[in-house]
Amino acid sequence: MSSSRRLTDQERRQIVRERAKGVSVSAISATLKVSPKTVYNVLSRGRSAASANDSRTRVLTMRVTDRDLRGFDAALARRGIAHRSDAMRCLMLAADDLLRPDEGMTDELKGMSAALNRVGNNVNQVARRLNEAKLKGERLPYTPASHAEIRDLAVLVFDMADQIQEMFRARRRELDLEVTKALAGLVRQEAAQVAEHGAE
């Protein structure tokens, strides 16, 4: 197996594509008849000579706090990912799914907002009747039935609060799944690299 020959640009692109699909380094090196070290060099140095349309020519910078960075690194480490830039690239490519509004949640929240407005109107009517009676010096028209009505309204409000919390928890779970899906290829790739380095 020749490890010293110069790879073509097409072969470099092939290495990057195959590795992204989860093909092992040993299989790639066998196919191209180069050493695994050559494959690793292409992957680690980013030497794939892609066309102008898909080459990585833009550099993004951003400022974060030490705490932000520690949190991000910890989240990557839990998934077995070592390279921030690769993870950010995967998340950027999945941005359409990650940042897409949840239309179902939006519709449910609109319905709950309308229901809360109705509850607020009912409470205002009760308060108005009580205030009018107080101003006129009349006996307050607050009966056991009124008390039961207020209690039912309170139960409705608390139930709606629970539903809203559950919707946000479900959305969080959905986003976690989307992030996991976006990073899955990178996780497999890094796990395979670790396994292959250990076997050498």
Image: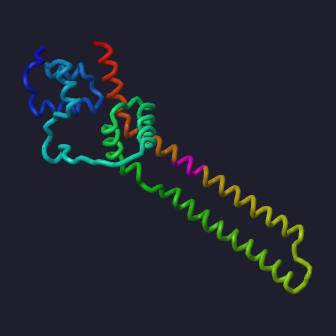
17 sits to left or right of 170:
left
Q: Is residue 75 above or below residue 93?
A: above
Outermost residue on the right side: it is: 139
Task: State the quadrant of the N terminus.
Answer: top left
The residue shown at (45%, 34%) is: 74
**Residue nearest the viewer, comparing 106 with 168:** 168
Does residue 13 lie above or below 156 as drawn? Answer: above
Instruction: From the image, give the main secondary structure of the stretch colored magenta.
Output: helix
Q: Which of 12 and 194 is in front in this view?
A: 194
> Closer to the camera, 181 or 75?
75
- Residue 114, position as x, y percentages in the image: 61, 68
Which portion, as a residue range, is magenta? 166-171
At a point 35% along the width and 28% down the height, the residue shown is: 188
Question: At which x and y percent is residue 155?
Answer: 75, 58
Whether 95 is drawn above or below 191: the answer is below
Q: In which image quadrant can residue 34 be found?
A: top left
Q: Position of residue 131 (x, y in %)?
A: 81, 80
Residue in front for this viewpoint, 141 or 59: 59
- Name the residue rendered at 61%, 51% in the picture: 165
170 is within the stretch colored magenta? yes
Lateral position of residue 175 relative to residue 30, left or right: right
